[in-house]
Image (spheres, rainbow, N blue to C red):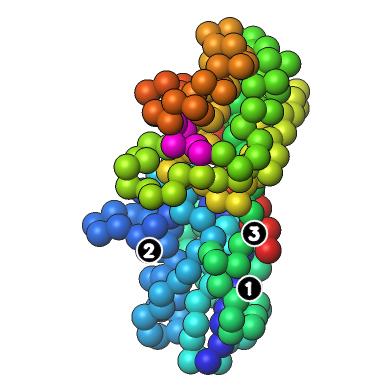
Amino acid sequence: MQNVKIIVEYKGTEYSGFQIQKDLDTIQGRLENCLKIILRNDVKIKYASRTDAGVHAKEQVINFLTLNGVNSVKLQKSMNALLPDDIVVKNCEVVEKTFDSRRDAKSREYEYYILNRKYPSAFDKNYFLIDKELDIESIVIASKHLIGRKDFRAFCKDASETENTARKVENIEIERRNDFIIIRIIANSFLHQMVRIIVGTLVEVGLGKRKPNDILQILESKQRKFAGKTALAKGLYLTKVNY
């Protein structure tokens, strides 16, 4: 029995999220079908983070157990030959049998890309275009209120489906790179659409529609209706899983 760890990157635009869903095209479905063809038996993968429809990943981590003898180099080449161009295997290795890509992850990192100018890009479409100037200083002040272990029920789409809505946000970094504003959020784990709701709320702060301290009241309310709009999926990337 071998435990195989794979690092995958993908553009989520054409897929109904990562997790397999009946009659829908998903990243997990593509990966498992690819592995089934190569290994000639059904494979059930585990994964570090479930990304929603339209969300991308620069470093998604998966693993699976197999009785087949696996050559990591050949497996990577075979998978990249069979997978569509928007799903790529970056690394493949045999690891300890106890490794679990989801349970062993200590934190996940997501980045959200905002293009803050009057016009879109002709080359890259995976961002949220905001044509009014954002107040970065106010966004930074507001983001500090989200750091630490807190109840993020107000920043979750389906809080009623989750018993424990407390999460530990380790850090939030705001970076300006030319016309792009990148919001990087690191946490032990995330609730459904948590990053996108946080970003949508911070954008409203940056536009002057909310004050930075409003974040405290939103957290205290524990009600989704008091947080901002959900930012577009296409601007969000899973960038790193830390073990």
Question: Residue shown at 43%/31% (left/top)?
Answer: 222
Which amino acid type corresponds to the residue marked 1 in the rendered image? Cys
Q: Position of residue 33 (x, y in %)?
A: 38, 71
Question: Residue shown at 56%/22% (left/top)?
Answer: 215
Rendered-image quadrant of the C terminus: bottom right
Q: Position of residue 64 (x, y in %)?
A: 50, 77
Question: Label 3's element?
Answer: loop
Neighbourhood count class around disc 2 (C-alpha, 10 Å): few under 14, some 14–19, many 20 upward: many
Pointers 2 and 3 in contact (CB under 8 A)? no
Question: Residue shown at 30%/57% (left/top)?
Answer: 21
Residue located farthest toward the left when viewing the structure as drawn: 23
Pointers 1 and 2 in contact (CB under 8 A)? no
Q: Which residue is mark 3?
A: 106
Which quarter of the figure has residue 128?
A: top right
Q: Position of residue 228 (x, y in %)?
A: 46, 22
Q: Along the polypeptide, which appears first: circle 1 or circle 3?
A: 1
86 to 103, vertically: above or below? above
Mark 2 → mark 3, Cα distance in angstroms: 25 Å
Pointers 1 and 3 in contact (CB under 8 A)? no
Q: Along the polypeptide, which appears first: circle 2 or circle 3?
A: 2
Magenta stretch, residue numbers? 151-155
- Residue 152: within the magenta? yes
Report if residue 129 is visible in the image. no
Which amino acid type corresponds to the residue marked 3 in the rendered image? Lys
166 to 116, vertically: above or below? below
Which quarter of the figure has residue 103?
A: bottom right
Label placed on residue 92: 1
Label placed on residue 48: none
Q: Which residue is mark 2?
A: 29
Which amino acid type corresponds to the residue marked 2 in the rendered image? Gly
The dominant secondary structure in magenta is helix
Neighbourhood count class around disc 1 (C-alpha, 10 Å): few under 14, some 14–19, many 20 upward: many
